[in-house]
Amino acid sequence: MASNPRNGRPYRRLTVQQRGLGLPCWICGHDINYALKGADAQRSRWAFTLDHATPLSLGGNLLDPANARSAHRACNSGRGNRTTPSPAQQRTSRRW
C-alpha cells in the first residue's frame, strides 16, 4: 500500500514555504488568516490551504512550487478541479 504523498516531508516543506510568503488568496484576492493553525484551521473557512494552479487530477505537479498557490479553505474547495476560479469567486476591480 502506497503512502499519501501529502503526508511526506517534501509536501510539508512546500506548504511551510508557501505559508511563509503570507500572500492573499489567489482565488478571491482577500487576506488569509495565517494565525489559524491546528484544529482552528480545520474548522475555519478562511484559513490557509495549499492550492494547485493546475489541479492534480488534471496533471498538476504536487511538489512544484510554480504550481503552488495560497488559498482560503472555502475558495479552494469551491474551485474544485477547475483550472480557473469560477466567475463568482473572482475578485472584481472597483476601478473603471
Image (tube, rainbow, N blue to C red):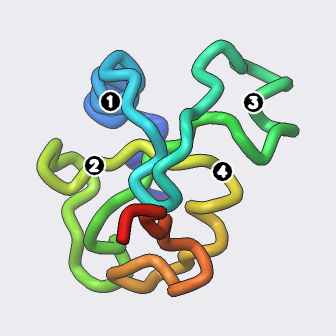
Q: Are marks 3 and 2 in contact (CB under 8 Å)?
A: no
Mark 1 residue crowding within 10 angstroms, few (<14) / some (14–19) / many (20+)? some
Q: Which residue is mark 1?
A: 18
Q: Position of residue 84 (x, y in %)?
A: 36, 80
Does residue 73 appear left or right of residue 71 in this picture?
Answer: right
What element does badge 3 sit on?
Answer: helix
Pointers 2 and 1 in contact (CB under 8 A)? yes
**Residue kind at label 4, given as amino acid type:** Arg
Residue at 65 percent across and 50 percent down: it is 73
Q: For mark 2, what is the residue? A: 68
Disc 1 to disc 3, C-alpha distance: 16 Å
Q: Along the polypeptide, which appears first: circle 3 or circle 2?
A: 3
Amino acid at dot 1? Gln
Q: CA distance from mark 2 to mark 1?
A: 7 Å
Which numbered tag is attached to residue 1? none
How crowded is the residue under tag 4: few (<14 C-alpha within 10 Å), some, or many (20+)? many
Q: Earlier in the sequence, mark 4 or mark 2?
A: 2
Q: Is residue 15 left or right of residue 36?
A: left
